[in-house]
Image (cartoon, helix red, strand yellow):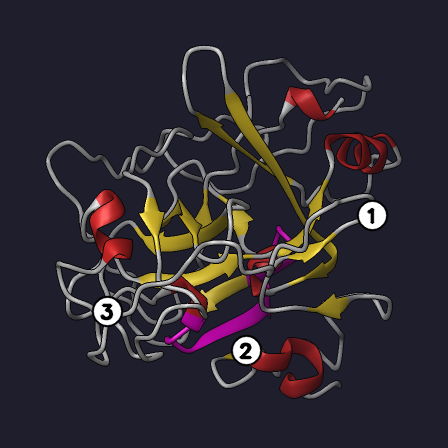
Amino acid sequence: MATSEELFGDDSKYVTCSSDVNGAVPVPDSFKYTAVNVAGPGLQQDPSEIVYSGCDCTLPSCGQHCPCIQMFGPSYTEDAKLVTSSSQTLPSTDNDIITKPVLECSASCQCSSECINRVVQNGPRFQLQVFNTTTKGWGLRAVEKIPKNTFVCEYAGEILTDKEAKKRTDALTGDDMNYILVVKENISDEKVIRTNIDPAIIGNVGRFINHSCNPNLFQVVVRIENEIPRVGLFAVRDIEALEELSYSYWGDTKQGQLDGMGRLHKPCYCEGPNCSGFLPIDASLF
């Protein structure tokens, strides 16, 4: 079996693969691991390109006067938990997650890597394990307890143009998994920013997380280097050791049993009390 370093690259300090899978490898030989988003075919901008100007804070960790923090207000507490308020909700059943924008300090900032405003970019900080589930194929679980509102991992992969995202979706067979996450940000009544993230060929550990209609993770859109968003997955509640990690895939479960190509929707095996019976799917990909 391949080593954790070979499978999970820079994240291998915190991500391992269960030894009870008889030597099976959880990804195809063609898969390449990346801890951060990379440009897919035809994308004009490098997702890691530093565009935003950084702060000139002289302390190792930024305070309330940091321009990065002042942009939208503090995002994290001293113990790296996401700041929430009564106006923000962390629903466990809805697909729409309401949070304020998050802007982290970047490589152009003068603060240290331990700055309070650097969380998602520092990667996983809890031990995670890829394992073989009973009905859902590969999954990801917590090896240790993870407190509520803390960062677990990013959902990273290739950033695709809409054309490439639709091309890849059209090429899928009924047995293929669709890993494309479509992030839609409503800027105004008439403007929606759309970002397609696909970890199928090049991606990180987030690709192993299964859907649940009653998830223990929620998605937060984070910007660091430029306007291309990154998606951080945070704990909805306290997560126990050896509990499988899950989030609600963005999409529609009410279109019936057929997707936009006339193929059967994949069944959902989350076994939650509110299970819709089918995995969500984004109709805009067809």
Q: Name the residue under label 1.
A: 41
Tell me the element at label 3: loop
Question: Disc 2 marks which amino acid?
Answer: Asp
Mark 2 = which residue?
11
Q: How far apart are marks 2 and 3 (CA)?
A: 21 Å
Tell me whether the residue at label 3 lies in contact with that at label 1, contact meaning CB atoms closer than 8 angstroms: no
Please tell me whether residue 6 is drawn above or below residue 90 in the rendered image: below
Image quadrant holding the N terminus, namely: bottom right
Residue 50 lies within the magenta run: no
Q: In which quadrant of the rendered view does residue 80 lie?
A: bottom left
Amino acid of disc 1: Pro
Q: How far apart are marks 2 and 1 (CA)?
A: 25 Å
Q: Position of residue 81 (x, y in %)?
A: 22, 61
Compare marks 3 and 1 and give the one earlier in the sequence: 1
- Taking the spot 59% from the left edge, 61% from the top edge, the residue there is 48
- Percent x, y of residue 103: 35, 51
Q: Height in image: 135 above or below 256?
A: below
Above/below status of 13 relative to 104:
below
- Residue 188 in the image: state x and y as whole percent: 41, 17
First to last magenta residue range: 122-139
Is the residue marked by circle 3 packed among few (<14), some (14-19), or many (20+) residues within 10 Å? many
Q: In this view, does 86 lie to the left or right of 26?
A: left
Q: Name the residue under label 3.
A: 116
Mark 2 or 1, nearer chain start: 2
Going from N to C along the chain, the mark reached first, 2 or 3, is 2
Q: How far apart are marks 3 and 1 (CA)?
A: 35 Å
